[in-house]
Image (spheres, rainbow, N blue to C red):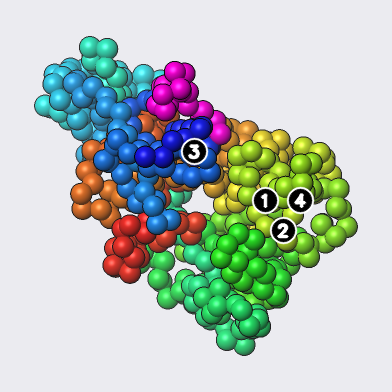
Amino acid sequence: EKKYKNLTLFGSFNGWNRQELPMKDEDEDGEFEIEVPLEPGVYQYKFFGDGEEIVDPLNPEKVPNGFGDFNSIRSIEDSESDKIFLHVNNYKEENSKIDYSFIVESSKSIFDKNDVTALLNNSEIEKDNLTITKNEIAVSLEAEKLKGENYLRVAVSKNGKISNMQTVILFDGKPADNKNFTWYDGIIYSLMIDRFKDGDKNINNPVQHDSLLEKANYMGGDLQGIIDKLNDGYFDKLGINALWISPVYDNPNEAFREYPAPHRYYSGYHGYWPISPYNVEEKFGSMDKLKELISIAHKQNIKVLLDFVSNHVHEQHPYFKEHRDWFGDLELPDGRLNLRFWDEFRLTTWFEPYLPSFDYLASTDALEAMTDNAVWWLKETGADGFRHDAVKHVPNEFWRLLTQKLKKEVEAFRDVPVYQIGETFGSYDLISSYVNNGQLSSQFNFNLYDVAIPTFTNSSSSFSGLNKEMQKTFSIYGGLHLMGNIMDSHDKNRFMAFADGDLDVSEW
């Protein structure tokens, strides 16, 4: 049995930071210990010792981590007794009144009107407007008092136990739909332009390189392909009301090799290597074609999110060529290359030697230029918001300034708020720290995703773990939130690859 000199604990509860939680072997007997307070939920974790990751040998519960290994699983139980959960049921119009129905899920509690709090906007609804039938609550309101936009909120409290607060957004008394769109009801379809549909073969121009695999090259997908599917009614049939398209920036016409093994070559088919602040990738189309796409989508009541890259540019980008002082150094003072230090140098680390990372805390000019550039893209194209790449590698100062500019220069002239959803892998605390009125609208809920995927792909997984994680999500973000609850991400193996059997669950 191998003996370790040092061990740390890391997992989903600390953003997979290997350095943050050192374990102690106080009597030097080879047994390391650490105590970490955790809320009820399901957590994945491993140990890190002497340069290697270690699955807990004393815990048989584990799940594949998608990299050929496993993560250990620890479930923290919560008391199930007297839990109360409130569900939205339905609504019906009758004469001059509208009744809204809610279902109470509770293991033991018997409740009455006095246990129910119902609010219309910020005013309490009188108890006479409530009807309790077994576990169903009906709220009856006069239709004439529900003109315009209103918020109906309902919660139950019994014997010290409080349910979630259910919120229903109403337009003229009816729950919001695509005609009265709010981002709370957004169903977002993610697509990578190059891999979606080839609509214009005349602009196909893959990168020429002997070591570039076909799958890592441009495949021909373009903006016209998306327009074709919009016109076909494809997205309407799917039932989505928002599109998130991969970055449209101009990317280099060459292949570049990844720094870590196995040192494969890639093209910029994905769009995340910008070489221009304003130009659209010619293999995808033109700025006019992008505007046409967004205009057609809007006519079908579909919003469009652009993918904005604020953390870095490609070395061919004019900002790097002309303003080297806007970027951090690739080489650290100790001689190491500042590459992929996701936690140790979170705000300055480079993803690749050819992808210089902005150092916004050291350059106000960079901060102003890139936030102005984001505003320009929304003004120029009419897009409805952003998916933001690598949020945790960009300081809060950037997001505050950007949101301030968007509210003043874009949102003030639109009926629907600009939506900003970020990509951050880390703990609930880290992810939620960027979501507030002065920064982002939302982030992808990767912590829920990490529990959902094995639940739906592994027949031995229980739904109880997913339920606990959902309850944790509600407790942190609230019942009505804008977080992106996802079953798929281009940063991970695709869910449908597991569902179709193309990938084994062990490859998750």
Report the residue at 82% width, 57% height from top: 319
Q: Is 420 left, or right, of 375 in this rendering?
A: left
Rendered residue at 27%/48% (across/down): 455
Residue type for callout 3: Gly
Secondary structure, mark 4, is loop
Q: Is residue 82 left or right of residue 263?
A: left
Which numbered disc, 4 or 3, marks the residue that appears first in the sequence? Answer: 3
Q: Are marks 4 and 1 in contact (CB under 8 Å)?
A: yes
Q: Residue 334: x, y in percent?
A: 76, 41
Which class describes the residues within 10 Å of circle 1: few (<14), some (14-19), or many (20+)?
some
Q: Which amino acid is tagged 2? A: Pro
Q: Which residue is mark 2?
A: 353
Which residue lies most toward the left here? 134
Q: Which amino acid, mark 1?
A: Leu
Image position of 236 with respect to 390: above or below: below
Q: Nearer the viewer, residue 475 or 171?
A: 475
Mark 3 vs mark 1, foreground winner is 3
Rendered image: mark on residue 330: 4
Please identify the quarter of the rendering in which residue 171 is found.
Answer: top left
According to the image, label 1 marks what residue? 339
Q: Element under label 3?
A: strand
Towards the viewer: 419 or 446: 446
Q: Residue 322 in the image: x percent, y percent? A: 88, 57
Name the mark nearer the viewer: 4 or 3: 3
Label 3 environment density (alpha carbons within 10 Å; few <14, some 14–19, many ≥20): some
